[in-house]
Amino acid sequence: MSLKAQKILKANISPIFEKVRDKVYATFPKETVRFLKKEVDRFENPLGYRLEEGLKGLVTELAGDLSWEKVDYFLDRIIRIEAVQSRQPSEALAFLYYLKSAVREVVGEEILEDFGPEALLEVEDRIDAMLLRAFNHYMAAREKLHELRIEEWKSRLYLLLKRAGYLYDLREGSLPPEAGNTEKTH
């Protein structure tokens, strides 16, 4: 990316972050937004803390040298929240489109005037690359979530069958109920 466009982005990290955060918060119910904005302590409001940390980190990386390791960390912070929501994948990953929109609204004109459309396209290409990585994170998180649900279902079914007397566990050291009733009928 053009070093000059980077300077514009770095100078506007806070306004871009605030615009993205507001757009993301607009997707939540009003009561949730009040809570998210009220408290950003990592222990009292872990959801708000993770969202803010992730969004601010992505904006900072976009304006900087773009370490994919850091980008993956920040994407993972946000995606884990989105993966457990009952949203469509397009809604879950919309925060990156909001980032693109925020960049256009806050610094788009300035980048276009100073450096032309190529510089703005470079910035947007970075965001598109983040989106592709975010999709991989989202799919991995959803897959893990489904695996956990299946394991939980298996565990509950096992306990139910065991309580009903249909299963015998050798580790318990006792015979199954029907084995104790060995009456000889000759």
Image: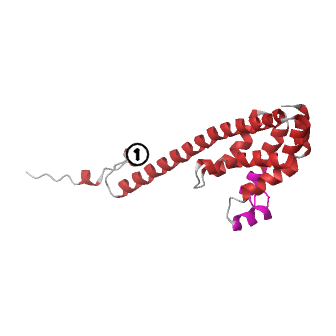
Instruction: Please provide percent x and percent y for residue 68.
Output: 75, 33
Query: Could you say where residue 95 lies in the image, as x and y percent from the top left?
Result: 71, 49
Q: Is residue 89 magenta?
A: no
Image quarter hosting the N terminus: top right
Give the residue drawn at x 48%, y 47%: 151
User: Which residue is farthest left?
Assistant: 186
In percent of width and height, residue 7 lies at 91, 38
Residue 3 location, x and y as percent? 89, 32
Q: Residues within 10 Å of mark 1 (few under 14, many from 20)?
A: few
Which residue range is magenta in the image? Answer: 30-52
Quarter assignment of residue 8: top right
Q: Nearer the viewer, residue 92 or 79?
A: 92
Where on the picture, by quarter, is residue 110? top right
Closer to us: 155 or 168:
155
Horizontal side of 135 relative to 111 (left or right) equals: left
Q: Tell me, yes or no, if residue 163 can be seen here.
A: yes
* Front residue (pair 43, 101): 101
Amino acid of disc 1:
Arg
Main secondary structure type of the part rendered in magenta: helix
Q: Which residue is mark 1?
A: 171
